[in-house]
Each structure stands twice: as structure tokens, then as C-alpha cells.
Image (spheres, rainbow, N blue to C red):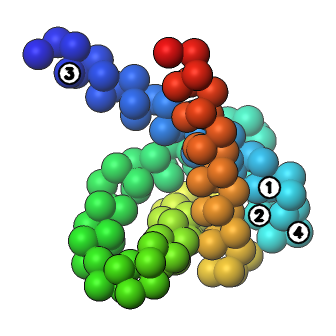
Amino acid sequence: MKSVHHGFIYRFMLRWVVCALGLWIAAGLLSSSVSYRGNHLGTVVIAGLVLAVLNALIKPLLVIISLPAILITLGLFMLVINGVTVYLASKLYSGLHIGSFGVAILTGIIIGLVNYLVTAILEERD
């Protein structure tokens, strides 16, 4: 039972880091549309936490509700769902500014690519 608890914490912390890193990269690539207020590092870390929590709690519900659209678009609607979570994170945390919903979708794509790279690196190590 204890290893299940530690596994969950490890996965959540990894998601948190990936979200923060993805947001940081998105801010660098889309600097006119993605920005942070205040202490840059602290703001990115908190924004990553907000996004990681939304991905853990809200995103599964959005996927279930949107399943027909996901199936009809062969998974492409997941880009919209990722954009919704990023946009919602910017509305819940005032330190993160996302210029538009389209920028939120692009930011979600960047975070997804970062997640893919981090996962590939970690799987290669194992």
C-alpha cells in the first residue's frame, strides 16, 4: 500500500515539473501571448501546480464528457481539452496570463511535447 502512495506522489510531482517546464518554454516561444506576473520562477512553479491539479481532477471529466468528439476527430479534440485546462489555469491563477484560447491550445501542445520528451528520457533510463 505504501508504494502505491509513493507512486502517486512521484507521478504528480513529475506532472507538476512537466507543466511548469512546458509553461516556461511556452512563455519563451509565445512571449507576446503567454506571460507571468511577479517572481518569474515562483509564478511558473505555482502556475505549473495549478495546471497539474486541473489535469488530475478536471481533465478526466472533460475527456469522458467529450468522448464522442474525441472519437470522431480521431483524438484531435484532445488538443482542445488541453487548451481548456491551460486557459482555465490562467483564469484561476492571476499570475499566469494566456492571451487567447488559441494560444492556450498552442501552450497545451508545447506542454504535451515536453511531456513526451520527459517520458521518453525517463523510460530510456529504466
Q: Nearer the viewer, mark 3 or mark 2?
A: 3
Q: Nearer the viewer, residue 39 or 5?
A: 5
Please report whichever mark, 3 or 1, sits nearer to the chain's N-terminal start.
3
Please report whichever mark, 3 or 2, sits nearer to the chain's N-terminal start.
3
The quarter of the displayed image where residue 69 is located: bottom left
The residue labelled by disc 2 is 34
Proximity of marks 3 and 1: CB atoms separated by less than 8 Å: no
Q: How many marks?
A: 4
Q: Could you say whether the residue bearing mark 3 is in a helix, strand or loop?
A: helix
Q: Residues within 10 Å of mark 1 (few under 14, many from 20)?
A: many
Proximity of marks 3 and 2: CB atoms separated by less than 8 Å: no
Q: Nearer the viewer, residue 101 or 125?
A: 125
Q: Nearer the viewer, residue 69 or 91?
A: 69
Q: Tag 4: residue type? A: Ser
Looking at the image, which residue is at 84% across and 64% down? 30
Q: Tag 2: residue type? A: Val
Gap in angstroms between the C-alphas marked 4 and 3: 42 Å
Q: Tag 3: residue type? A: Val
Proximity of marks 1 and 2: CB atoms separated by less than 8 Å: yes
Gap in angstroms between the C-alphas marked 3 and 2: 36 Å
Q: Could you say whether the residue bearing mark 2 is in a helix, strand or loop?
A: strand
Does residue 126 lie above or below 18 as drawn? above
Q: Which mark is residue 4?
A: 3
Please report whichever mark, 4 or 3, sits nearer to the chain's N-terminal start.
3
Q: Nearer the viewer, mark 4 or mark 3?
A: 3
